[in-house]
Amino acid sequence: MPLNSKQLPTTILKEFGKFAVVGVIGTAVDFSIYSVLTRGFDVFYIYATCISVFIAIVNNFIWNKYWTFEKGQSGKTTKESYRFFLVSIVNYFLNIGITYAVVTYTHAEVLFHSSEDYFAKAIAIGIVLFSNYFGNKYWTFKS
């Protein structure tokens, strides 16, 4: 049944909310695995990041496919997984670039006890959340 114009904003907000929840869960998965690898197994932080980000992307793909966008029976899992991974990697580098730009070009002094880097990271996450959502909604899981 097609949505009417009054249902559409509510549906998109609900879907976006689910997407954000999956993002929070993915962040928790990423940080948890990273912490276990670096603190528990003394894995080099770059290797640990590669592993934890990859696992978080897989986690997010599964949650977004079956819960957020409800495409469980789409029959396009391989195509969707490639697209999701590509969107995730592009947004990963966008996140790094925005964080770097905010810290560097706003002349924020990033010290161990400083919070400018957290501010930059928050800005990056906010921007990337939207580009990630729209990339996956209209490309990865498009109807």
Image: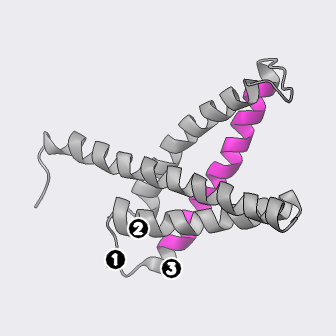
Q: Which residues are magenta?
A: 80-103
Residue bearing the label numbered 1: 74
Task: Determine the residue located farthest toward the top in the rendered image.
Answer: 107
User: Quarter of the image containing the N terminus?
Assistant: bottom left
Sequence-earlier tag: 2 or 1: 2
Q: Of 56 and 12, which appears nearest the observer?
A: 56
Tell me, yes or no, whether the highlighted magenta stretch contains residue 93: yes
CA–CA distance between discs 2 and 1? 9 Å
Name the chief secondary structure element in magenta. helix
Q: Is residue 8 left or right of residue 25?
A: left
Percent across and percent down for residue 39 are: 82, 59
Q: Is residue 85 visible from the viewing direction of this image?
A: no
Residue bearing the label numbered 3: 78
Q: What residue is shown at x 65% (from left), y 53% (from top)?
A: 90
Q: Amino acid at mark 1?
A: Ser
Q: Which mark is residue 132?
A: none
Nearer the viewer's eye, disc 2 or disc 1? 2
Q: Of 127 and 115, which appears nearest the observer?
A: 115
Percent across and percent down for residue 50 are: 76, 63
Q: Is residue 101 left or right of residue 141?
A: right
Q: In the rendered picture of this protein, how many numbered marks are placed on residues?
A: 3
Q: Crowding at label 1, few (<14), some or many (≥20) Cα neighbours within 10 Å? A: few
Q: Amino acid at mark 3?
A: Thr
Nearer the viewer's eye, disc 3 or disc 2? 2
Dots 3, 2 in contact, CB < 8 A = no
Dots 3, 1 in contact, CB < 8 A = no
Q: What residue is shown at x 79% (from left), y 22% (from top)?
A: 105
